[in-house]
Image (cartoon, rainbow, N blue to C red):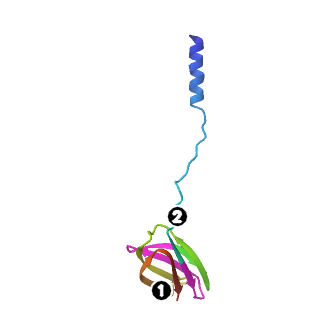
Amino acid sequence: MRALLMGLALLATAACGPRQVEVGSGAASQAEVMLNVTNNFSQAVSVYVVQGGNPMFVKLVAANATETIPVRGVASGSTVTLRGTVADGSRTVEKTGVTLSGSYSWTLP
C-alpha cells in the first residue's frame, strides 16, 4: 500500500512540474496593398491612410525620398483618402477617392 501511495505521489509531482510552452500572437498579417510614396518636400512627411474617417499612420517619409510602404489592415480594392502632413505641420496634402489594390504610387506635392 505504501509503495502505491509513493508511486502516486511521484506521478503527481511529475505531472505538476515545469513545462515548455510556446506563446505567439498568431501568423503575421501580410499587406495586400503597397504604397509607393515620393516626397518632393524639403521636410519629412507623415503619411496616413484614411478609411471610414479614421486616419491610420503608415510611415514617416524623409525629405526628397521615395519609400515603398506596406499598408496593413486595408483590404485590396478599398477606397481611401491619402494624407501627407509635413513635419512642421505647416502643410497637409490629401488625395481623395483612391482605390488601393496591388501597388499604388503617390507623389507629394
Residue 73 circle label: none
User: Mark 2 against mark 1, which lies toward the viewer?
Assistant: 2
Image quarter (top left, top right, bottom left or bottom right) of the N terminus: top right
- Rendering coords of residue 29 (x, y %): 51, 61
Question: How many labels were placed on the picture?
Answer: 2
Instruction: Identify the residue under disc 2.
Output: 30
Q: What secondary structure is marked by label 1? A: strand
Query: Which kind of residue does numbered mark 1 sit on?
Result: Val
Q: Which residues are magenta?
A: 36-57
Say whether marks 2 and 1 touch (CB < 8 Å).
no
Q: Residue furthest front?
A: 102
Graded by Cα atoms within 10 Å as few (under 14), some (14 to 19) or many (20 or more), the crowding at tag 2 reads few
Please give the name of the residue rendered at 55% of the width and 84% of the height, measured from the top-left corner.
Answer: 88
- Rendering coords of residue 28 (x, y %): 54, 59
Residue 63 falls in which quadrant of the image?
bottom right
Q: What secondary structure is marked by label 2? A: loop
* In-image side of 38 versus 76 (left or right): right
Residue 12 falls in which quadrant of the image?
top right
Based on the picture, tell me whether residue 96 belongs to the magenta stretch.
Answer: no
- Rendering coords of residue 33 (x, y %): 50, 72
Asked whether 40 or 46 is in front, the reply is 40
- Rendering coords of residue 103 (x, y %): 51, 76
Residue 93 circle label: 1
As displayed, is residue 73 above or below residue 62? above
As displayed, is residue 5 above or below residue 18? above
Based on the picture, tell me whether residue 43 belongs to the magenta stretch.
Answer: yes
* In-image side of 88 versus 75 (left or right): right
Asked whether 11 or 29 is in front, the reply is 29
